[in-house]
Amino acid sequence: MKKIYSHIMMIVLSVGILSSCNEEMIQNESYGFLGIRMDNDLSEDIIVKSDVTADELVFAVGVYNASGQLVAERDDHNSVTTDNPIRLQIGNYNVVASNGTNLNAAFDNPYYEGSRNVRIYADKVNTVELTCTLANTAFSVDFPAEFAEHFDVYEVAVTNGVGDKLVLSNDPEDGNALEAGFDSKAYFDVTGTLTWELYLQNKDYDPSFDSHGHEGGIYRATATYTDVKAREHYHLTFELGEGEASDGAFIVKVILDSSMEESSHELVLDFDNRNLPSYATNAEFDVTSGEALTVPIGNTVTKQFAVKTPVGVKSLRAAHSSESLVQAGFPAYVEFIGASSELIQSLSDAGVVISQASRAGVPVQGAVETTIDLTRLVASLPVGNYSIEFTAVDLKGHFDVFEFVFEIISDVDAEAVAAYTGWAAFAKLEGRFFAADAPDGLTFQYRKATADEWTELDPSHVDINTATLRYSAVLTGLEPSTSYVFRAVSAEDKETKEISFSTSSAATIHNLSFDYWYKSGDAWMPNQNSDNYVWDTANPGTASLGYIPTTPEETTVVKGKAARLETQLAQVMFVKKLAAGNIYTGQFVKVAGVGAELDWGIPFSSRPLALRGYMKYAPKTIDYAESPHTDKKGKTDFCQIQMFLTDWTGTFRISTSSKQFVDYTSSSIIARGEMHTDATHNGYVKFTIPLVYRDNRTPAYAVISAAASMYGDYFTGAVGSVLLLDEFELVYDPAELTEEEYNAVFSQINPF
């Protein structure tokens, strides 16, 4: 087989720490950088049509971690340079480059893709080569000009067996994306097969002639290629040979030239429409109206049809794209003639019974009648819409198609479909109804799995989509780590299918109230004791110098005790450095130079929606400032409170002296929220910080931090600025948020 290849692109990936990184890129021993440069290698036998040259192709790049999660992406490989690399933690990754959209079937839609596994090392450059090639299959046809002298319509329909048919026609319908002229190529996702169907209507077409449902002057032929692979181009050329009259029928010879086989086949097109394949159904199985058959769920009325091929059957196949049928045991594509006894038995077990006149067992070629019984299959299917296409081909190449379109309907008004969870206090419930108009009283009932009584959701909270016959509702106020059951109900139906779901955990963090403190030497520690070491401050580093910026507050509080953060000026020998009052989840490591090293983060795997608490701030005018914030001097100080969730595999090392901080644009940040203000408060004010989720991953670490001077990490702030914090809490229930806050949490993702 001759394979005609499309553009072959070579992508060279450089992996490691790049010497020309921007200085603000955080250098850390657990990270490396991914850079990309492109080399183009064009094969001399490229014939697949493209509107751009290889040099002009733009590749999107995605980087996936060992769990298959997308951790970095670029829309244009040209944007990844030594000045703008992709920053990654050390580890194993799969790098995927692609150009185009991988559609199941579309005209003039080549899709290029390549991938390669790579490991990122710290302080080491690694180079890999990634080859991008055509990932789909091309199909095209040629009809010489003389076809127009004999035929009004000549076209070829092509399918890969699982999706739409694409039609290459002499007269394609305007605006129909599934039809195109012969100058186009059809591209298909690779399924292993391609089936083409030739349709010819000659100029002597007589619609009044009818034999077995076929009009005079119409000819159809079909063939299937197997072992179809990516990068193959199937091109068929049809030529007219000499014609002759035979029994009043018009006969032509068509030469089929298939470049991938380098062979020609002579087909005799017999337009005598007698003895063509046909179908006949049993009386109860009437599908002659052309409309979808409506079948109640579990219906066992006989559904059988006979395939008649007077000159003998060559091929009898079925194709569909229904996942429910596949799950029921009916493959998406199956050839019945010559199938193995194991396949025939498997189909029979699924309720598809195949038999031939005067023969039992495996269907064979040459039979004039084959019966297909679908009674048990249809009776086993869930509610839904279905379409199965049966194609019969006789020994002369004639064929006919029988499309069985039907809908399984429910015996109730509505039923539950799914529950979308993953959150601690809320879930999305989805149901469907079965009439054009939503039934009265359409809603849901739910209960704890351990309870007997149902709670009915107010129908006004239900979102109904009459176009899809679906409806849904977001159920709030649920208990964390709890199993529930729900069902769809209407005014008429209550006892319907039940679906179970569970909420996730709602973890808290020790001492969010800031009521617990103990002393370690002279340093106050915001924990109950050394065995509950969750929070830390700069105190362990400054206490030896006589400065304790963070202390317990017992007078001005909301309840119990509070945390008092004050920005102070510390002097080390002859050097004065600002020490902002701060608090964070993590641990103080050591004094480093004129700054400190801290490990931020504590293990945490829940997904709160917001951080809520009370604060009181009394800012001063910034009197100490260092680069890059010298412009802040003379302005009112800012405080900061923030929380973020990450997928870190360990704590993050902060170094204030070397300006090593968390990169908040990193893909490792799952959700983040912050607030800062320079306002002066006369008393405590309540705040809510929505956590803006960037994806639906489950976190591994959480960080909460606050500072009396927002730029204290850069030794910039106002001596004497004081921030009081009290009664923090994590919010899990969206019912506790305003609409604006809820929208902020999910402004970048769909929670379900």
Image (spheres, rainbow, N blue to C red):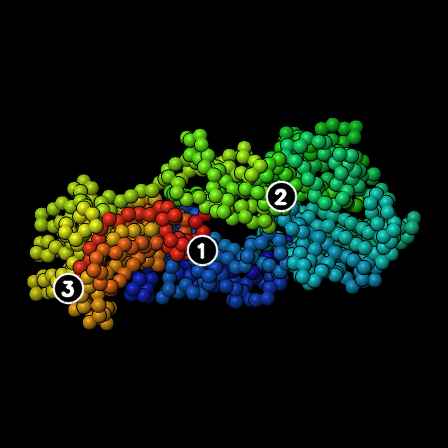
Q: Is residue 406 visible?
A: yes
Q: CA distance from mark 2 to mark 1?
A: 43 Å
Taking depth in this image into account, of 302 and 161 the one nearest to the observer is 302
Q: Nearer the viewer, mark 2 or mark 1?
A: 2
User: Earlier along the polypeptide chain: callout 1 or callout 3?
Assistant: 1
Picture quadrant of residue 19: bottom left
Q: Amino acid at mark 1?
A: Gly
Q: Is residue 499 above or below residue 125?
A: above
Q: Is residue 348 above or below residue 262?
A: above
Helix or strand or loop: what does disc 1 sit on? strand
Taking depth in this image into account, of 151 and 284 the one nearest to the observer is 284
Helix or strand or loop: what does disc 3 sit on? loop
Residue under label 3, please give it. 719
Residue under label 2, please give it. 435
Q: Is residue 241 visible?
A: no
Q: Is residue 16 above or below residue 516?
A: below
| Residue name at image x 56 percent, y 54 percent | 102
Give the percent coordinates (x, y) of residue 179: 69, 58
Q: Nearer the viewer, mark 2 or mark 3?
A: 2
Give the percent coordinates (x, y) of residue 58: 50, 63
Residue under label 1, please give it. 62
Q: CA distance from mark 1 to mark 3?
A: 47 Å
User: Earlier along the polypeptide chain: callout 2 or callout 3?
Assistant: 2
Q: Residues within 10 Å of mark 1 (few under 14, many from 20)?
A: some
Helix or strand or loop: what does disc 2 sit on? loop
Q: Amino acid at mark 3?
A: Val
